[in-house]
Amino acid sequence: MDWAVLRERAVEAAQSAYCPYSGLQVGAAALCSDGRIVVGCNVENASYGVGLCAECALAGQLFLTGGGRLVALACRSGGGELLMPCGRCRQVVYELGGAGCLVDTPSGVLPMSRVLPDAFGPEDLP
Ligand code: THU
């Protein structure tokens, strides 16, 4: 697991962000179960609430490039600062990587079971 590569890919992705409203470039990069890396950047909208987070773009890339599961994820600003996935995106990552997916956090590398404790997930549906 090469966190340096994942972090750098997240910074690169952030630099493609479309963020004219917040000015915050966000990039996400994830290692997939087959070893490839998928990335995403945020895409904002004049209708502010319609903006897409970087992790949502990454979710699309996951399935567009072959599917599989997320194993590890890093989020960064265009300037390289560590950013945490927002609450909604934690749910997205939980869906696609499960409780064991590793996330780069200010407290170190943590599993999703720590990033989104007692999560609602696929196992809660009948
Ligand atoms: N943003 C993300 O892309 N991912 C997150 O997890 C947190 C927030 C974006 C959304 C918006 O374009 C900008 O950051 C400022 O909120």
Image (spheres, grey):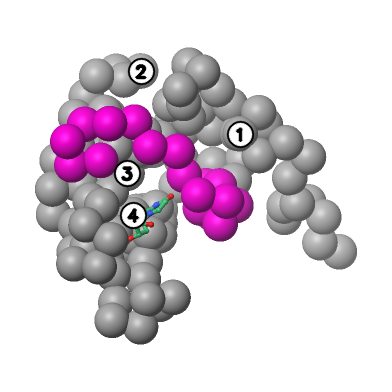
Mark 1 and mark 4: Cα distance apart in space: 17 Å
Magenta-drawn segment: 77-93
Question: Which residue is more in the foreground, 82 or 37?
Answer: 82
List x then y, in percent, for residue 124: 82, 55
For marks 1 and 2, the one nearer the N-term is: 2
Q: Secondary structure at mark 2?
A: loop
Q: Secondary structure at mark 3?
A: strand
Label 1: few (<14), some (14–19) or many (≥20) C-alpha neighbours in 10 Å: many
Q: Secondary structure at mark 4?
A: helix
- Where is mark 4, residue-wise? 54
Asked whether disc 4 touches disc 3, contact meaning CB atoms under 8 Å apart, the reply is yes
In the image, which is nearer the foreground, mark 1 or mark 2?
A: 1
Ligand 1 near label 2 (Cβ, under 8 Å)? no
Q: Specify the amino acid type for callout 2.
A: Met
- Where is mark 3, residue-wise? 28
Ligand 1 near label 4 (Cβ, under 8 Å)? yes
Question: Which residue is more in the foreground, 9 or 69?
Answer: 9
Image height of 84 relative to 60, above or below: above
- Where is mark 2, residue-wise? 1
In the image, which is nearer the foreground, mark 3 or mark 2?
A: 3
Ligand 1 near label 3 (Cβ, under 8 Å)? yes
For marks 1 and 4, the one nearer the N-term is: 4
Asked whether disc 1 touches disc 4, contact meaning CB atoms under 8 Å apart, the reply is no
Asked whether disc 2 touches disc 4, contact meaning CB atoms under 8 Å apart, the reply is no
The quadrant of the image that shows the N terminus is top left
Q: Specify the amino acid type for callout 3.
A: Ala
Q: Specify the amino acid type for callout 1.
A: Val
